[in-house]
Image (spheres, grey):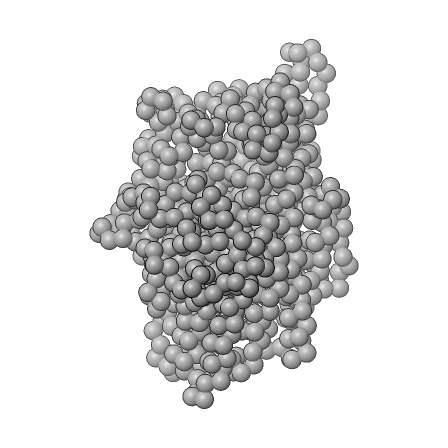
Amino acid sequence: MLRLRTLAIATSIALAACSQGPNEASQPTPASTAPAKSASTAAVTDTNATNPFFAASTLPFQAPEFDKIKDGDYQPAIEKGMADQLAEWRKIADNPDAPTFDNTYVALEKSGALLTRVEMTFNGVTSANTDDALQKVQEEEAPKLAAHQDELYLDSKLFDRVQKVYDQRDTLKLDPESLRLVEVTYRQFVHNGAKLSDADKAKLKALNQQESTLEAQFNNKLLAAAKDGALVVDDKAKLAGLPDEDIAAAAQAAKDRGLAGKWVIVLQNTTQQPALQYLTDRDTRKALFEASWNRAEKGNADDTRDIIEQLAQLRAQEAKLLGSPNYAAWTLQDQMAKTPEAAMGFMEKLAPAAVARARQEAADIQAQIDKDQAALHQPTFKLEPWDWQYYAEQVRKAKYDLDESQIKPYFELDNVLQNGVFYAANQLYGLTFKERHDIPVYNPDVRVFEVFDKDGKSLALWYCDYFKRDNKNGGAWMDNFVGQSKLLGTKPVIYNVANFTKPAAGQPALLSWDDVITMFHEFGHGLHGMFADEQYPSLSGTATARDFVEFPSQFNEHWASNPKVFANFAKNYQTGAPMPQPLVDKMQKAGKFNSGYAMTELVAAAMLDMNWHMLGADAPKQDADKFEAESLKKDGVDLSYVPPRYRSSYFLHIWSNGYSAGYYAYLWTQMLADDAFQGFSEHGGLTAENGQRFRDMILSRGNTVELSKLYKDWRGQDPSIEPMLENRGLKDAPKGGTK
């Protein structure tokens, strides 16, 4: 996932978020090296001499100075950053000279150096290494930052200058990227209310501040809900079937929480939990699933339902004010899909095939349950969602003689990184990597690599933070600490974050195949950022539509299973021996196994998101649970044993991470990615020539060209859904099965 910058900072487009100075998104220095002081104290005592944000970093690539940053530095820097940028905007608006591209558009691109530094830093902090003090700052600053964004878009004098240049754009002899900047910036102003009356602007400002406050509250409640919802086990026997390394990790997690003699299974952000495929005790499986399913619905301080019900209403009201029938219609105007009807129509082509295959898979699983129970002389039981992963694994063993535990020893994290992720990038793009131990990090788990281009020149810095922590959001994502811009003279500093299980001390970090895919996925986002080659920060790198930005990452997943790449990293961590060919063959045969389940849970979540954001402004406040159930039933994805990948109450993507009415993008970009890989395959696959062309025509172009045209120019045709149906195991899906 690309971490869209709307979590804690309301400046949602690159113009305000990625202006002058480095595009930095950093995290706080660990307490062991930089004790934090309270934000309230910092606001009084910080000066230009002591706050590290008040000047550009002197580290290579202007990387964040984590050895100097303290919790107390953020709030005063945010406040001063907003004040500085507001003064810059006022200077642009009040300029007595006639508006020109340089004194208006370029000046806007250069504004906000300080706010950019602290904003990007603060988003990184609150996502991956937060604490109580930072969460308090997050909630206090969110509405102020929403108001700050409104100061840009709703300033009549500033928009008048923007419009006058826009109206003359065809006579200004601008280069293509500059012309694109004029068009994108103008559309963003209009999209965010620049043409509203003064009375409606006041209403919009109030709505934006309410929304940003609720988003920050949702994020903090959900983080607490995930931590508090972890399953505590007091009898090791209840963990039967769980791999030794996972039991050790659960014991360490309990120890970290002061729960001696117990085991803690921490929650991942998705509905299903990795441990469910191993646990033989059905009661433990049920307890773990319910801990996940109910994490944010306990009627306590962690309950998020009232917040999301309010957010849905506020967004619908905002859309009406901006002239759209619903929030989805408003937000999709600048996406590839253009309308919610197009996005829903696309998903409606996938849902029946996915559901049909999931039903057939369920029938196979039910047969396995019946067989196992009969062998134990026990009555059978009906398949429930907490049974799926465990018995699907049994079916996979029976059908393909493949056990997840057989393959994990071949996927040791560092080997996958060095000889898989980095190797593929070298074969395609000529990149090489050198680990840096002299760059400060925000947590001891974080590693830093310098990235060198094929000509040996230094290209970027790349950080990875792979292990689960209680103070880290769930899931996996990419973002920039510093963004690329020729105008600002900055090169990319990028990070990937995940939530893999941290091994006990001295033990290897062995990954599942899904974890391996996650590494390749997030690094695909990283490549999109590293290869950015734009003049203007607003158009640079991953500053594209949501239903395009996941394309490079999902495309990069394909290289994990490329025979040449796979053979280079799939080696036993103890012996170094390659994975035996019979085991490789089993993996390939099982490649589409469980595809119905995987697609159904994803489509269900995406449709649920769209339904929330297609509510009109006149709709009453919804009951979250009732709305969710009715939506899933209406769309035909209400299989009792296939819950949506995210329940409404813990759907972080859509309530706090900028993917509102946009989760369908993962499916849309699967179509792009699979079609693109088909194109690679037609021209020789894993070659430097193919890689260079993809870099030149896709990865380096940012948002400098209309994205549909960008794709078609590279591919030679519009994307087809057929490779997606084939690759995801949905072509000619079976009919019937268990309802």
Q: Residue at x 40, y 33 (%)?
A: 413
**Vertical arrangement, residue 658 with respect to residue 405, above or below:** below
Most foreground residue, 432 or 169: 432
Q: Residue 686 in the image: x percent, y percent?
A: 31, 42
- Quadrant where the C terminus lies? top right
Going by the picture, which residue comes out furthest to the left?
Answer: 455
- Tell me, yes or no, if residue 489 can be seen here: yes
* Quarter of the figure with residue 640: top right
Q: Residue 560 in the image: x percent, y percent?
A: 39, 37
Most foreground residue, 502 or 205: 502
- Tell me, yes or no, if residue 562 can be seen here: no
Q: Residue 368 in the image: x percent, y percent?
A: 61, 20
**Vertical arrangement, residue 60 with respect to residue 502, above or below:** below
Q: How many marks?
A: 0
Q: Residue at x 24, y 53 (%)?
A: 457
* Quarter of the figure with residue 381: top right
**Vertical arrangement, residue 660 with respect to residue 596, above or below:** below
**Position of 63 compared to 80: left or right?**
left
**Position of 506 compared to 44: left or right?**
left
**Position of 551 compared to 373: left or right?**
left
Q: Residue 504 in the image: x percent, y percent?
A: 48, 28
